[in-house]
Amino acid sequence: MHFNFPRTLGQEDAKKRLSAALASGRFPHALLVHGEPGLGQLALLLDLAQILSCEDTATKPCGTCFPCRAFDASALETLHHLIPIVKNDRNSGSDDDEEAGPESGQIDELNESISLWHRHPYGYHVSEKAMVRTSQARELLGRLRFAENEGRVRVVVLPWLESLNDNSATILLKTLEEPPANVYFLIASDHRSGLMQTLLSRCLHLGLSPLSASDFRVAAETLSQRAQKPFAARLLPFAEGSPGLYVELLENDGEELLEEALRFLSATSDWRVFADYAAETSPGAEGMERTTRLLLFLLRMVRAYQLLKATTPANAGTRIDTAEALEQAGWDDSLAAYLGAIDAVADLQAFAAFLESAHRAVREYSKPSIALVGLFLEYEGKANRSVPA
């Protein structure tokens, strides 16, 4: 038996382990695929769901049997999705208020969300406020129990385990403790640490890692073609081996973020210049979102610079020849000006701490500039710079 994973880019070790489990007939009834966001968890869940549903006896998925064709059309009745949704404000009370389930208008949203996941697994995401409601979990359990005697394989896919609320997590736990016959639960998570330990203990865990440089470049070229956008070589170092993060940068002004990051770095030479820069930051939700994305991008730039320095041992402890290091790493040499600006930062450790603190604080302010300037003054003090009284 041969198993294909057409949606999942890289992750060859995980594919080999899964193929062995599938071939042996000992595939777990509950699998949790975890790792940093965008490594391929959601693509792998879809590949496994189609493999488990396929009826071919030589190659899975075959793409031609009825379950495969229905799967490609997002119309396979034996495939069940637990998709997080955002409850409308007018109906958002206690958790008990959700017993009626998704509202009529949200059914279409759920179907569109499922379709988007199938079409674009590396670019699929939902709001941080979205969660799997108690009513969704109960309805699913009812359908699984009702169909238990049919004998057909049924697959449940849950893209974010952390999107369960307390009640829906308890329902899923009880289901995993006594799983219905012929049902597989395929679950993904970006953050396992805060989840219910008893729930985690009922799953077999499979961790994904960032792709190697060669695999990642191939994945990025493939995703660029799928998105019908030019390949963005300059963004590769800041996606850190994550295809999903590359897609996010590709589709959400990654090149503009790079230019804005250079402006930010240029303003850090003097607190008054930085204050002028911060004053341009837009207030409100839009400005906050843009600023938090920029701060995260700057942290990735710092890590990229540190990686370059670590791979240039001859210059350890000194400023590196950024252009030479970029060439050795196989990165776009036009990044020399951007990473060179980080090279000029007086205290990189204190600067990274400033970025992390600023990222947390900006969300607590209606005017991000207040948080930025206040924390920047603290950073200057740590870097032993002259800070006017």
Image: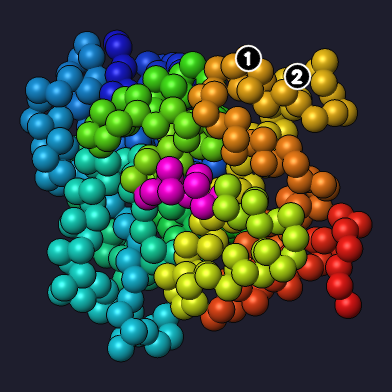
Tell me what residue is drawn at x 76 percent, y 45 percent. Answer: 345
- Is residue 119 shown in magenta? no
Q: Residues within 10 Å of mark 1 (few under 14, many from 20)?
A: few
| Residue stretch in magenta | 252-261
**Residue 270 or 53: which is nearer the viewer?**
270
Q: Main secondary structure of the magenta part?
A: helix
Residue 329 location (% of width, % of height): 61, 18
* Residue 90 visible here: yes
Tell me what residue is drawn at x 64 percent, y 51 percent. Answer: 266
Left or right of 183: which side holds 202?
Answer: right
Quarter occupied by the N terminus: top left
Q: Residues within 10 Å of mark 2 (few under 14, many from 20)?
A: some
Secondary structure of the residue carrying tag 1 is helix
- Marks 2/1: CA distance? 9 Å
**Residue 306 or 384: which is nearer the viewer?**
384
Residue 321 location (% of width, % of height): 72, 23
Query: Dot 1 corresponds to which residue?
Result: 328
Q: Marks 2 and 1: CB-CB under 8 Å?
A: yes
Q: In terms of image quadrants, where is residue 48?
A: top left
Q: Amino acid at mark 1?
A: Gln
Q: Amino acid at mark 2?
A: Thr
Secondary structure of the residue carrying tag 2 is loop
- Is residue 257 shown in magenta? yes
Tell me what residue is drawn at x 75 percent, y 19 percent. Answer: 312
Query: Dot 2 corresponds to which residue?
Result: 312
Tell me what residue is drawn at x 30 percent, y 12 percent. Answer: 2
